[in-house]
Image (cartoon, helix red, strand yellow):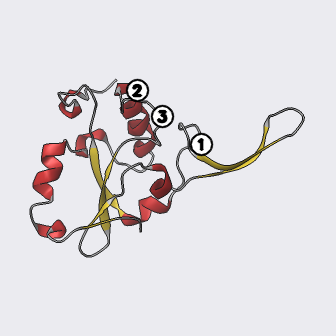
């Protein structure tokens, strides 16, 4: 497993941020991700799933993305659709993101800590950033 220690906050949770093209937000969440499904239909007799849709990444991420001034890229917190009373992201969650984003050639080497993300927001492409859905 990769070393995710730079993303570990003093509160015991991991906070990893990544800058991606805005188009990534329209991709579907990984099918095996926690709470990635929506509009799930169950069989009345067996209780088994018969159909579902996958959430888009915008729907899946629990915090709205930070969108650049020109609207071509955004900064996202790598988290998951939170379950009640869950205390945030752990190393296993980050490993899952690492695997998923590798499919798009986005390695954990370009992820940012909260401090690095805050530095990026102080100028350049994010001077007057917007927060919200695309």
Q: Residue at x 17, y 27 (%)?
A: 10
Q: Nearer the viewer, residue 76 or 42?
A: 42
Residue 133 rendering spot, x and y as whole percentages: 41, 65
Provide the secondary structure element on which disc 1 rests.
loop
- Of badges 2 and 3, the one in the foreground is 3
When asked about the image quadrant of residue 35, the answer is top right
- The residue lying furthest to the right in this view is 45
* Quarter of the figure with the N terminus: top left
Q: Residue at x 45, y 39 (%)?
A: 82
* Quarter of the figure with the C terminus: bottom left
- Badge 2 is on which residue? 92
Provide the secondary structure element on which disc 2 rests.
helix
User: Horizontal placement of 39 versus 99: left or right?
Assistant: right
Q: Which mark is residue 31?
A: 1
- Badge 3 is on which residue? 84
Mark 2, Cα crowd under 10 Å, few <14 / some 14-19 / many 20+, is few
- 133 w.r.t. 41: above or below: below
When asked about the image quadrant of residue 92, the answer is top left
Residue 124 rendering spot, x and y as whole percentages: 12, 68
Mark 1, Cα crowd under 10 Å, few <14 / some 14-19 / many 20+, is few
Mark sitting earlier along the chain (1/3): 1
User: Horizontal placement of 19 versus 127: left or right?
Assistant: right
């Amino acid at each position: 497993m990769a070393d995710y220690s730079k993303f570990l906050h003093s509160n015991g949770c991991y906070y990893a941020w990544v800058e991606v093209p805005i188009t990534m937000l329209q991709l579907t969440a990984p099918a095996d991700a926690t709470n990635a499904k929506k509009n799930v239909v169950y069989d009345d007799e067996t209780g088994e799933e018969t159909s579902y849709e996958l959430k888009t990444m915008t729907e899946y991420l629990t915090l709205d993305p930070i969108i650049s001034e020109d609207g071509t890229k955004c900064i996202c917190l790598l988290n998951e659709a939170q379950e009640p009373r869950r205390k945030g992201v752990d190393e296993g969650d980050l490993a899952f993101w690492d695997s998923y984003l590798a499919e798009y050639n986005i390695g954990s080497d370009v992820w940012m800590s909260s401090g690095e993300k805050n530095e990026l927001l102080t100028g350049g492409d994010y001077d007057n950033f917007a927060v919200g859905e695309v």
